[in-house]
Amino acid sequence: MDPKKRSSDKAAQEMITRMAEAGQQNVWDRLDAQSPQCGFGKQGICCRICTMGPCRITKKAPLGVCGADADTIVARNFLRAVAAGASAHSDHGRGVAEVFLATAKGEAPDYQFKDIIKLYKVAEDLGVETNNRSVKEIAVDVGKIALAEFGKPEGEQLMARRAPQPRQEIWEKLGIMPRAVDREVVEALHRTHMGVDQDFRNILMHASRTALADGWGGSMLATELQDILFGTPYPGRGEVNLGVLKKDEVNIIVHGHEPILSEMIVAASQDKDLLAEAEKAGAKGINVAGICCTANELLMRHGVPIAGNFLSQELAIATGAVELMAVDVQCVMQGLAEIAKCFHTKLITTADKAKIFGVEHVAMEEKTALNTAKKLVGTAIENYSNRGKVNIPNGKQKAVAGFSHESINYILGGKFRASYRPLNDNIINGRIRGVAGIVGCSNPKVPQDYTHITLTKELIKRDVLVLTTGCATIACGKQGLMNPKEALDLAGPGLREVCETVGIPPVLACGSCVDNSRILVACAEIVREGGLGEDISEIPAAGACLESITEKAISIGQYFVASGALVVFGKEFLPVSGSQNVCDYLFGGIEKDLGGRWALESDPVKAAELILEHIESKRDALGINKEAERKLYDMEDRRTLSVE
Ligand code: SF4
Ligand code: MSK
């Protein structure tokens, strides 16, 4: 077991070694135990959707019992992954909409609206009348309409109207303008039921529609409503990595995705009575830190430190310094329950839809949220005296995060002329070659963080501005790439000059998984600002997810492709190789339909080259790579000039 092969993060390597010495199992050990993994699953050619199966496609048996071929089976599995990913993001969004509406009605007293300007903006997008109406009236209507977006019987996603007009026309023409999220997901499950949709192209078209309902619907609503409720992020400082845990304080980790829980825990951790109790228990304070996307949400809004990304969750407990880990939904490993038993850490689930067998559950409800959070913090304080030996690695890095669409707009243009103009101008003049979104998870199949950080470094070196979300952001943070000073030293001269002039770092931390919608909004804004084409497919931009684990990542990839972008994915993480036709379509043919496509590349340096090639081809097509003709006029030329 070489810890360097498991993670490129030194603090993680230290913990991996300690866990191995103590005989404690983690995600990498379980991956070893599972190896070799099923080759049929890797290629997407196993089907178990009916009981005539399970069927696996081989040369000897190229058809399932029902006659389904590899194309149908791979496409069905792909659509099901998109539907599951879209469901995860959108159910998160629905939860936020419910709390939003309850807050508007005065039924969730612990929550308040923090960004009223954004409330007005979202009200306008959702068609809510704002003239001569109170904030409460507007918010109730926004909440009701937003909630309906998930399950309304008729009509299309209202947020999709934020996309550039030509993009909407493409969706209309192809019949994939997204409708209610629930409808797209239910239809996805119906189509992929045994004996329904058996035309891989038709199935993949619905994958686009379902993914669009996620990106321009469920995820976008989650982001927008969270901003109104908890505040739109603006850049602020924080720290990242296991070294943020404190030896002499009560450490609480919040892990998962929904700020509904973590916001209340942060508030409770500042309660005077609880701080006094912590002192009585011998601790110098209460330290809240985040894991996974919840961490991004808290860092962006409150500067709360991040302990790590997906693969660091078990390592955090193994420090012996965590009194309480409160988890809600998504990316929470069941393996936490086992490792928590080796330490004093209390692992508590808080979402009724996400319990772990044998783990204590404390339901988080909007009406009593702060009280529940206080109870959880109290539990952590009580547990402080049960601490055994503590091993906190030293590693931590300074980071700046909080780049929402609004804050980017503000920084670029200032309060009175907030605009993307300086960004567009600098893309046009070539100082910045283009923009890349680097998103995604950390997967034990590759050394933790390696691909994200290498790709990020390669791109900023080549004057590409990077926007990141999710665990990729945390990877960048752990390696100093969210520290503007360190990142600027790695940036190419053009990008560096622009960043220093307008005051942004070359790597912009944009938030959590649902906040990929911020990148969609940024793309639409670049188009709206002018000079870089009429549609997202024309701008010099691309997305990359070289380390992925979840179905959410596939949904995100598909909604970027369906929005017109190139998406580069790690080879081993898109299980479609079992069908040449599906591959030909996703990596090529789809571009004719939607302007975007998938590409597979696991090597981050090659991925950077691929992205740059794409960006330069878009620049060529826009005509902005041509040297501007410069002519020095002599007197003769001047005389011929006519001035009318
Ligand atoms: Fe096999 Fe067809 Fe049933 Fe799938 S749907 S398990 S391919 S018989
Ligand atoms: S948490 S989906 S491991 S980014 Fe959003 Fe990280 Fe991927 Fe989960």
Image (cartoon, helix red, strand yellow):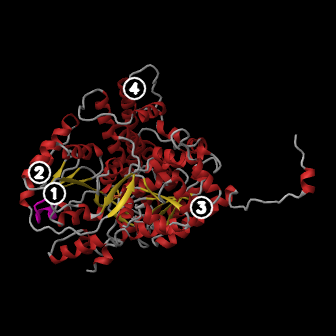
- In the picture provided, is 335 more to the left or to the right than 507? left
Contact? badges 2 and 1 (CB < 8 Å): yes
Residue segment shown in magenta: 337-345
Q: Secondary structure at mark 4?
A: helix
The residue closer to the viewer here, 427 or 79, is: 427
Q: Using the numbered discs, state the Cα–Cα distance from disc 3 to disc 4 in whole angstroms.
A: 42 Å
Between circles 3 and 2, the one closer to the viewer is 2
Task: Locate residue 382 relative to residue 494 in the image: left or right.
Answer: left
Q: Which residue is mark 1?
A: 249
Marks 3 and 1: CB-CB under 8 Å? no
Mark 1: few/some/many CA within 10 Å (<14, 14-19, 20+): many
In reply to whether residue 339 is colored magenta, the answer given is yes
Estimate the x, y position of residue 92 in percent, counting from the top left. Answer: 32, 44
The answer to whether 221 is drawn above or below residue 481 in the figure is above
Q: Earlier in the sequence, mark 4 or mark 2?
A: 4
According to the picture, the residue beneath numbered tag 4 turns out to be 138
The mark closer to the camera, 3 or 1, is 1
Asked where in the image residue 137 lies, by quadrant, the reply is: top left
In which quadrant of this rendering is ligand 2 seen? Answer: bottom left
- The x and y percentages for residue 89 are 36, 48
